[in-house]
Amino acid sequence: MFLEPVNEPEFEGYYYAHIPALDLTTHGQGVEGALAAAQELVEGWVAEKRAHGEPVPTEGKSLIAQIEVADALLRP
């Protein structure tokens, strides 16, 4: 999981919580709020998968990288 600040004025102080291994995203106020929302989302997601007899992945192979958008804006 990784956290990312929400860059919208009406959501100042909020963070996205991305869970790539499960293809899930949520948000919450502050880091603690985002972590709590992510925990709740994952628990609900797992419960739904189990209720429908679907497999629940236990490991994901994600690679996270970062690029600078500012560099792309400077190119003609």
Image (cartoon, helix red, strand yellow):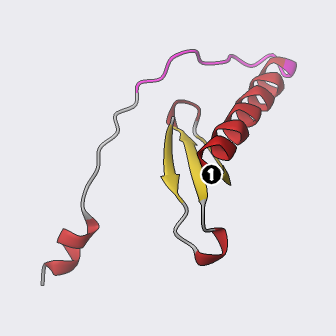
- Could you say where residue 64 lies in the image, as x and y percent from the top left? 34, 39
Placement of 45 over or under 67, stated as above or below: above
Of residues 47 and 38, the one nearer the viewer is 38
- Could you say where residue 9 lies in the image, as x and y percent from the top left? 59, 77
The kind of secondary structure the magenta stretch mainly shows is loop
Residue 39 on the magenta segment: no
Residue tagged by mark 1?
30
Of residues 60 and 10, the one nearer the viewer is 10
- The structure residue drawn at horizontal position 58% and vertical position 54%, both measured from the top left corner, is 15
Of residues 12 and 58, the one nearer the viewer is 12
- Could you say where residue 24 lies in the image, as x and y percent from the top left? 62, 41
> Where does the C terminus fall, quadrant-wise?
bottom left
Secondary structure under tag 1 reads: helix
Point out the stretch of residues depicted in magenta.
Answer: 51-61
Check disc 1: other Cα within 10 Å, few if <14, some if 14-19, many if 20+.
some
- Could you say where residue 29 lies in the image, as x and y percent from the top left? 68, 54
Instruction: Tell me the quarter of the picture where residue 56 sits.
Output: top right
- The structure residue drawn at horizontal position 51% and vertical position 34%, both measured from the top left corner, is 1
Instruction: Tell me the quarter of the picture where residue 44 sits.
Output: top right
Instruction: Tell me the quarter of the picture where residue 41 sits.
Output: top right
33 on left or right of 3:
right
